[in-house]
């Protein structure tokens, strides 16, 4: 029998243990030690022993995994990004009033969206908008992203940045899409102690944070 994760459930291995993100319920969770061991056997294709049967039933009853004869396995399916090596701390550009206004408006709209929509709906919205807008290939994209980054630094004068990494990152991505810049929204986690963080990345560069801040986090979702 082969298994897959149920719909709208993601996981990554952080600190040697799986951490799950339920995008339909907007929450993170882990597994008890015994269920954790059984799940990792399934991931690695190792045979289950008699003591694993009870844990397998728990994983199935909690709808963490579902049987699927055509499943390729339980390897995490989230996109793999290059390891972050640089940021825009010293490369931000002077932002125009127009871009600053876009940043403020985007934060307001993003906060409203996150209050009203589940994360799976937010993901779909980003992907749909991105598919409808062509990428700017003019060669001036670095300057544009640097200006957007500076605008969001100015927005800190209006909005507190405490516990707003998802709101701010979603707003950053929204402005980038409007200006035809392709970037990725990244949600990452640490396992011990548990912590979650969100940032915007392009290639190996974090755009709205610092390398030191994001490196401890393992990506669990990339949009």
Image (spheres, rainbow, N blue to C red):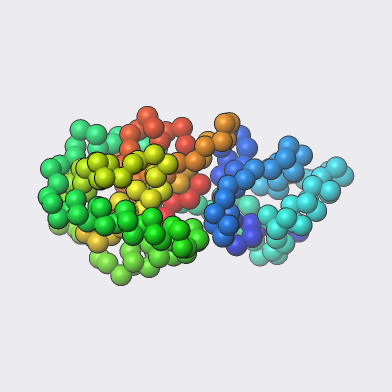
Choose between 105 and 180: the one closer to the eye. 105
Choose between 28 and 215: the one closer to the eye. 28
Classify the position of the N terminus by image quarter: bottom right
Identify the residue at horizontal 44%, vertical 51% (top origin): 222
Q: Which residue lies furthest to the bottom in this view?
A: 132
* Residue 9 visible somewhere in the drawing: yes
Q: Is residue 198 above or below residue 107?
A: above
Q: In this view, does 61 lie above or below 40?
A: below
Identify the residue at horizontal 39%, vertical 32% (top origin): 213
Q: Is residue 61 left or right of residue 202?
A: right
Q: Is residue 205 above or below residue 10?
A: above
Task: Count all numbered tags in the image, as a single digit.
Answer: 0
Q: In this view, does 148 lie to the left or right of 81?
A: left
* Residue 181 visible somewhere in the drawing: no
Classify the position of the C terminus by image quarter: bottom left
Q: Tell me which corner region of the image, top left, top right, bottom left or bottom right, holds residue 31.
A: top right
Q: Residue 100: x, y in percent? A: 19, 50
Q: Tell me which corner region of the image, top left, top right, bottom left or bottom right, holds residue 209.
A: top left
Q: Tell me which corner region of the image, top left, top right, bottom left or bottom right, holds residue 110.
A: bottom left
Q: Residue 150: x, y in percent? A: 20, 43
Q: Residue 26: x, y in percent? A: 54, 54
Q: Residue 35: x, y in percent? A: 74, 43
Q: Is residue 17 left or right of residue 50?
A: left
Choose between 135 and 210: the one closer to the eye. 210
Identify the residue at horizontal 62%, vertical 45% (top origin): 29
Choose between 91 and 83: the one closer to the eye. 91
């Amino acid at each position: 029998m082969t298994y897959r994760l149920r719909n709208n459930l993601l996981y990554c291995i952080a600190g040697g243990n799986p951490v799950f993100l339920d995008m339909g319920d907007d929450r993170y969770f882990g597994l008890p030690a015994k269920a954790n061991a059984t799940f990792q056997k399934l991931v690695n294709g190792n045979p289950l022993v008699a003591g694993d049967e009870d844990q397998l039933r728990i994983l199935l009853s909690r709808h963490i995994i579902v049987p699927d004869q055509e499943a390729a396995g339980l390897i995490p399916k989230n996109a793999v990004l290059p390891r972050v090596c640089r940021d825009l701390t010293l490369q931000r550009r002077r932002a125009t009033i127009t871009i600053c206004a876009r940043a403020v408006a985007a934060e307001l709209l993003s906060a409203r969206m996150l209050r009203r929509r589940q994360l799976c709906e937010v993901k779909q919205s980003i992907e749909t908008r991105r598919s409808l807008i062509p990428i700017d290939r003019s060669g001036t994209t670095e300057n544009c992203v640097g200006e957007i980054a500076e605008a969001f630094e100015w927005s800190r004068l209006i909005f507190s940045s405490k516990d707003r990494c998802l709101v701010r990152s979603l707003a950053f991505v929204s402005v980038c899409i409007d200006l035809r810049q392709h970037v990725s929204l990244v949600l990452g986690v640490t396992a011990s102690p548990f912590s979650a963080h969100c940032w915007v990345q392009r290639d190996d560069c974090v755009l709205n944070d610092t390398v030191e801040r994001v490196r401890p986090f393992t990506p669990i979702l990339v949009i």
